[in-house]
Image (spheres, rainbow, N blue to C red):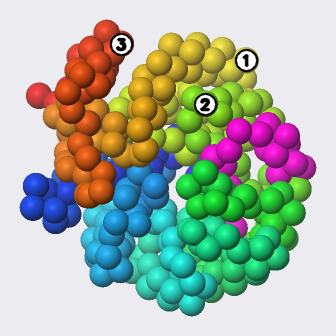
């Protein structure tokens, strides 16, 4: 069963000026990632403005993108709904449309107790046979997925293949690793304020579920490789420290505000943001452009 490894990039949902989904742009983003070393994509994560998509748009994204990306690059789809029933229904729809995998979060805003959250995640995972992952992002959804919950998923759900961590505790990473061993791949976010990317790889993690790969895909692919040789360790650290200022910039504001601006600078279809988000503009936009230019990103990745 496929397990994400290396650079797992969360891509944005590109919108036209009219507010509709830019399907051609979506395809171009997928092709760009597949051509530059990214191992797996996450569609409809936080960076995909998933909470600003209608239920029908989410289904259409699964239908179209599963078909387009098949054979190019594996795609996992975010399945974040308030109720267990909605999540299961969407999961089964995604499986029927050929999705490679699904990603579950704690239901946003509801703040369920840990026992209820564990039951929810187990029931959702068991509703399908395709690979599933959890996205532990308490700053976004308000609930922390505890190590024991992740361990229960690993024990009860053979299709639970990956844990995406977005929190700042190395102790938590160690506790999760102790419970899941090699059954489940542990990947982390690239948020500089947490700075858990290198520690994740050091404890035997399997990569980074990141946004930086939207802008520097080849570099993130090298940074996020599992550490199975001293050469990879040294290259990973060197590149991470070099591009750390760019990662900081990508998190100036909530995802995907800066990501879309950076993609547009490169001539890639980042597209518009849906309200209440507002496009990056003015001094911050020029600061971003200057940083990308100084780091050689525009020269390397600007579309001709």
Question: Is any part of residue 123 visible from this angle?
Answer: yes
Check whether the beta carbons of the residues at disc 1 and disc 2 lie within 8 A of each other: no
Q: In which quarter of the view is residue 122 placed?
A: bottom right
Residue 240 point in image, percent of width and height: 56, 21
Q: Which marked residue is nearer to the observer: mark 1 or mark 2?
A: 2
Q: How crowded is mark 3: few (under 14 residues within 10 Å), some or many (20 or more)?
A: some
Residue positioned 33% across, 16% down in the render: 291
Residue positioned 28% across, 32% down in the render: 262
Q: What element carries label 3?
A: loop
Q: Which marked residue is nearer to the observer: mark 2 or mark 3?
A: 2
- Foreground of the two, 251 or 125: 251
Q: Is residue 19 above or below residue 247?
A: below
Position of 222 with respect to 170 (left or right) is left
Q: Does the magenta stretch include residue 220?
A: no
Q: Which mark is residue 294?
A: none
The residue tagged 2 is: 193
The residue tagged 3 is: 295
Q: Does the magenta stretch include residue 174?
A: yes
> Marks 1 and 2, how far apart in space?
26 Å
> Marks 1 and 3, how far apart in space?
26 Å
**Disc 1 or 2, which lies upstream in sequence?**
2
Location of the C terminus (image quadrant): top left
Q: How crowded is mark 2: few (under 14 residues within 10 Å), some or many (20 or more)?
A: few
> Marks 2 and 3, how far apart in space?
21 Å
The residue tagged 1 is: 230
Q: What element carries label 2?
A: loop
Q: Is residue 287 above or below residue 148?
A: above
Residue numbers of the magenta segment: 159-178
**Disc 1 or 3, which lies upstream in sequence?**
1
């Amino acid at each position: 069963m496929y397990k994400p490894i290396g650079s797992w990039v969360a891509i944005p949902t590109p919108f036209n000026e009219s507010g509709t989904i830019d399907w051609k742009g979506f395809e171009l983003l997928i092709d760009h990632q597949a051509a530059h070393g990214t191992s797996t994509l996450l569609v409809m994560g936080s960076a995909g403005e998933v909470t600003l998509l209608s239920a029908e748009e989410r289904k259409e994204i699964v239908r179209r993108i599963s078909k387009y990306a098949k054979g190019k690059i594996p795609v996992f789809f975010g399945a974040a709904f308030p109720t267990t029933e909605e999540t299961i229904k969407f999961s089964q729809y995604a499986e029927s449309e050929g999705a490679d995998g699904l990603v579950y979060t704690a239901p946003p805003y509801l703040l369920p107790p840990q026992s209820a959250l564990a039951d929810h995640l187990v029931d959702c995972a068991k509703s399908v046979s395709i690979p599933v992952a959890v996205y532990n992002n308490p700053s976004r959804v308000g609930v922390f997925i505890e190590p024991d919950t992740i361990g229960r998923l690993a024990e009860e759900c053979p299709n639970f293949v990956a844990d995406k961590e977005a929190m700042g505790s190395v102790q938590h990473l160690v506790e999760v690793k102790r419970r899941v061993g090699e059954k489940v791949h542990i990947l982390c976010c690239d948020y500089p304020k947490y700075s858990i990317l290198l520690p994740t790889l050091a404890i035997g993690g399997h990569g980074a579920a990141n946004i930086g790969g939207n802008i520097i895909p080849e570099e993130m692919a090298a940074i996020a490789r599992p550490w199975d040789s001293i050469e990879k360790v040294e290259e990973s650290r060197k590149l991470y420290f070099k591009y750390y200022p760019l990662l900081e910039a990508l998190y100036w504001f909530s995802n995907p505000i800066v990501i879309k601006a950076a993609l547009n600078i490169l001539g890639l279809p980042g597209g518009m943001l849906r309200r209440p988000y507002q496009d990056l503009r003015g001094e911050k936009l020029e600061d971003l452009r200057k940083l990308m230019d100084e780091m050689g990103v525009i020269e390397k990745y600007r579309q001709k």
